[in-house]
């Protein structure tokens, strides 16, 4: 499905994106030593439902949680659990999305649990900036590869790797639409970015190798070498004046 929206559709989509962003902010506030990821999932579920929206990850392809909560060497798709307790020094990647009025929002961030190591802080900082670089490249007339190249270059300059097995995506009436938005690739290649296109840009960055493995639960994706991983994501609309972040907190 094409991810190009009319101005009216983008306005409607803004509501889903605002709710997604606020759910993520609330989830981040709840990241503390001793808290379980199931507790954070409940905060996300309760908030999204209180807004009349639907947590769009829940049940998607059979996913059991309202959000993906991925700790330390878990890259993405961590299943919220009462048995996963957060500890001081953990880094916690939370991916939240809400659907309302027929449109979807999608965003993610990695949060520090208490005081974290310099290495943990650095991978979070680099991944957040990689997302900013990717968004800056999302100009009308550019191509998807310009986003990919901007993210990959920044990440690799800092000695980290970008995950290949999972990518960003178009987003709109469906949570996952065309085109794919890889975090690696060549500038000037791939689909052309046009005004009205709504995409989720989401660098997943590993401390060491980009190779990942999926656990036997069928969901949890971890780094193969046990290194840390961080994940930041925004839903963005391409406008004639450049990219506009729809999942901006307080936006
Ligand atoms: Mg996404």
Image (cartoon, rainbow, N blue to C red):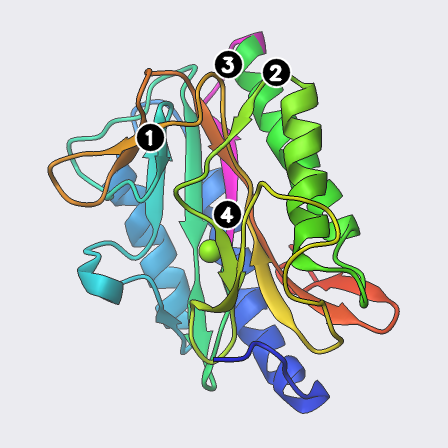
- Tell me if the residue at label 4 has its CB under 8 Å from ligand 1: yes
Indicate whether 131 appears above or below 87: below
Indicate whether 122 appears above or below 57: above
Mark 2 sits on what residue? 159
Labels 4 & 3 near each other (Cβ < 8 A) = no
Residues at marks 1 and 4, CA–CA distance in whole angstroms: 19 Å
How packed is label 4: few (under 14 Cα within 10 Å), some, or many (20 or more)? many
- 62 or 82, which lies in front? 62
Which is nearer the N-term, disc 3 or disc 1? 3
Indicate whether 28 appears above or below 245: above
Residue 249, image x and y in percent? 64, 54
Residues at marks 4 and 2, CA–CA distance in whole angstroms: 22 Å
Q: Which mark is residue 212?
A: 1
Which is nearer the N-term, disc 4 or disc 3? 4
Q: Foreground mark, 1 or 4?
A: 1
Residue 13, image x and y in percent? 58, 78
Residue in the image at 76% along x and 76% along y: 195
In this picture, residue 245 sits left or right of residue 35? right
Viewer can see residue 214: yes
Give the structural element (helix, strand or loop) at label 2: loop
Q: Which mark is residue 108?
A: 4
Mark 3 sits on what residue? 116
- Tell me if the residue at label 3 has its CB under 8 Å from ligand 1: no
Q: Foreground mark, 4 or 2?
A: 2
């Amino acid at each position: 499905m094409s991810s190009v929206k009319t101005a009216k559709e983008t306005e409607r989509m803004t509501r889903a994106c605002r709710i997604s962003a606020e759910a993520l902010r609330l989830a981040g506030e709840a990241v503390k030593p001793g808290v379980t990821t199931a507790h954070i999932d409940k905060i996300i579920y309760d908030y999204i439902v209180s807004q009349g929206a639907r947590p769009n990850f829940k049940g998607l392809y059979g996913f059991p949680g309202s959000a993906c909560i991925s700790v330390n060497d878990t890259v993405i798709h961590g299943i919220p659990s009462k048995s996963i307790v957060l500890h001081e020094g953990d880094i916690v990647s939370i991916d939240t999305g809400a659907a309302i009025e027929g449109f979807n929002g999608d965003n993610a961030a990695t949060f520090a649990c208490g005081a974290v190591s310099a290495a943990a802080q650095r991978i979070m900082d680099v991944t957040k900036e990689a997302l900013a670089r990717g968004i800056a490249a999302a100009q009308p007339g550019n191509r998807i590869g310009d986003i990919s190249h901007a993210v990959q270059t920044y990440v690799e300059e800092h000695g980290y790797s970008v995950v290949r097995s999972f990518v960003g995506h178009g987003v709109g009436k469906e949570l996952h639409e065309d085109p794919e938005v890889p975090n690696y690739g060549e500038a000037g290649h791939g689909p052309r970015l046009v005004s009205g296109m709504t995409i989720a840009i989401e660098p997943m960055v590993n401390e060491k190798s980009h190779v990942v493995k999926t656990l036997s639960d069928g969901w949890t994706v971890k780094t193969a070498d046990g290194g840390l991983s961080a994940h930041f994501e925004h839903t963005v609309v391409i406008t004639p004046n450049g990219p506009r972040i729809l999942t901006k907190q307080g936006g």
